[in-house]
Amino acid sequence: MATSHDVLVIGGGPGGYVAAIKAAQYGLNVGCIEMEKVLGGTCLRIGCIPSKGLLESTERLHQAQNEFADHGINVSSVKVDLAKMHARKDKTVGELARGIDELFRRSKITRYLGVGRFLSPSKVTVVGTGEEIQAKHVIIATGSKSATLPGIELDGERVGTSTEALNYPEVPKEMIVIGAGAIGLELGSVWQRLGAKVTVLEYLDRILPEMDDEIAASALRIFTKQGIIFKLGSRVTSAKKDGRRAIVTCDGAPPMSADRVLVSVGRTPNTEGLGLEVIGIETDKRGRIPTNEHFQTTVPGVYAIGDVIAGPMLAHKAEDEGAAVAEFIATGYGHVNYMAIPSVVYTSPEIASVGFTEKQLQEKEIPFKKGKFPFIANGRAKVLGDTSGMVKVLAHAETDRLLGVHIINNRAGDLIAEATAAIEFAATAEDVARTTHAHPTLPEAIKEAAMAVHNQAIHM
Ligand SMILES: Cc1cc2nc3c(=O)[nH]c(=O)nc-3n(C[C@H](O)[C@H](O)[C@H](O)COP(=O)(O)OP(=O)(O)OC[C@H]3O[C@@H](n4cnc5c(N)ncnc54)[C@H](O)[C@@H]3O)c2cc1C
């Protein structure tokens, strides 16, 4: 006999596990099928958390090698124990994964280990164990996997994805990163700080295509100064293992070789083996499951959230969709404000953004004013010894409502939270400018940039 649930979630990543917990909070009987032993999905196992672990460790290394002396702290010799660095990162992942297990246990969510496959819109089998699970509502939260390009031969060793780049057992002498998006730049930075000569090949004539042009151009200058080599406008035609090295070819350029190649050209939704064809769901041309604003697919009772649907492939976007879909199932309400989803690149400096870029506003013909404030004029940035970067605030030219905030600074990822809350609450630039900010803090630069929208910055 089939087990039965009010809600069955397929996929235990940030979208799926949050949807499961939230649905349980509404008193629903919830099951979750996850094919990996560890819950937490791409984000926890092979994404956000391990990459930030390595970024944190290597940033400390960089500081010890280059910045401590300025503070009068002399460290005679700094040595890297890469195995220990990896172990620390893995320990963090393990602890957080056990935390989700505990949350599931407390929420009385039934966990199924295996691949979920639809038998009908309300019945899913766990491939391998053969269990059949009946559910009134099924949420697809199967996430995404690394994309690749024609001509690239992933061998999982010399030519690999972010999953391999999180675990190189030794520091490559030379590393080629294909794709100058967030993942490529973060992991390129990690290995560059550890001593690799890193070359980034990017098809476009810029890095970080989703980010504000001016901020991305500023980031490019800073990363280049740090020693990362950028070859923009490079169309990669092949990459393959060549003995203990790899060879990469690009249109109109001599072949390049490196110890390791990281292919970071985006991610594709995970729908293979789900049996979507059995229930009549067709994916769009990018392989995503189409949904309406309530995350309902074309099949009644079947929903989809996270990386497997349209929108930015970000953990917090997946989480908020997970919470919203559970709320919708339980109450008939629940939505996500896509205007207020921040995006962060955790390089040094960090790059963070929320709302529209200048270019998007120009394309939409929305009149706007902008205010900028550089961290060089911020007292806390001076004390921290890190005055690079700026805040840019974009506000509607007539209503003054905040339309976008873009920050480049080592703590931009934390700073963007204030701007996100302001946009969520439909604040104006004046609201932010009139809000008291503690001194001396980095967020004062956001206040000053908001004042600069009306040419009223004090410290500039
Ligand atoms: C290196 C890297 C760094 C990243 N850094 C960040 C970051 O700093 N911040 C950020 O916001 N985002 C980051 N991301 C993106 C983030 O990881 C994803 O946006 C997020 O994990 C998407 O969540 P999800 O729940 O939709 O899918 P996923 O996290 O991909 O989870 C889907 C889960 O479904 C399971 N699954 C798939 N198919 C089935 C099936 N048929 N049956 C059962 N289980 C199945 C998978 O095993 C997986 O556990 C990063 C990604 C990578 C690769």
Image (tube, helix red, strand yellow):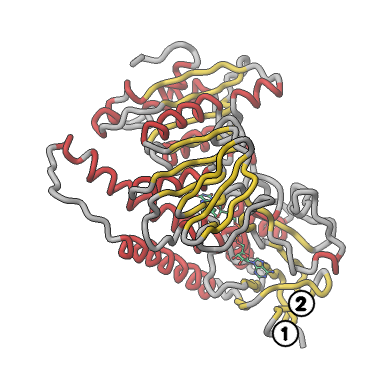
Q: Quadrant of residue 20?
A: bottom right
Q: Measuring 73% from the left and 65% from the top, which residue is drawn there?
A: 272
Q: Measuring 48% from the left and 18% from the top, which residue is drawn there?
A: 371
Taking 284 as reference, is 32 left or right?
Answer: left
The percent coordinates of residue 150 (x first, y second) are 69, 51
Amino acid on which the number 1 mark rests in the picture? Gly
Q: Measuring 26% from the left and 43% from the top, which residue is drawn there?
A: 63
Indicate the quadrant of ligand 1 in the picture: bottom right
From this view, report whether residue 84 is shown above or below residue 233: below
Residue indicated by mark 1? 130
Taking 85 as reference, is 223 left or right?
Answer: right
User: Which residue is nearer to you in this view: 216 or 384?
Assistant: 216
User: Which residue is nearer to you in this view: 151 or 457?
Assistant: 151
Q: Nearer the viewer, mark 1 or mark 2?
A: 1
* Residue 455 visible to an observer of this rendering: yes
Q: Quadrant of residue 51?
A: bottom left
Which element carries disc 2, helix, strand or loop?
strand
Residue indicated by mark 2? 134
User: Which residue is nearer to you in this view: 349 or 178?
Assistant: 178
Respond yes or no on whether mark 1 lies under 8 Å from ligand 1. no
The percent coordinates of residue 138 (x first, y second) are 74, 66
Amino acid on which the number 2 mark rests in the picture? Gln
| Quarter of the figure that contains the C terminus | top left
The percent coordinates of residue 452 (x first, y second) are 45, 16
Which element carries disc 1, helix, strand or loop?
loop
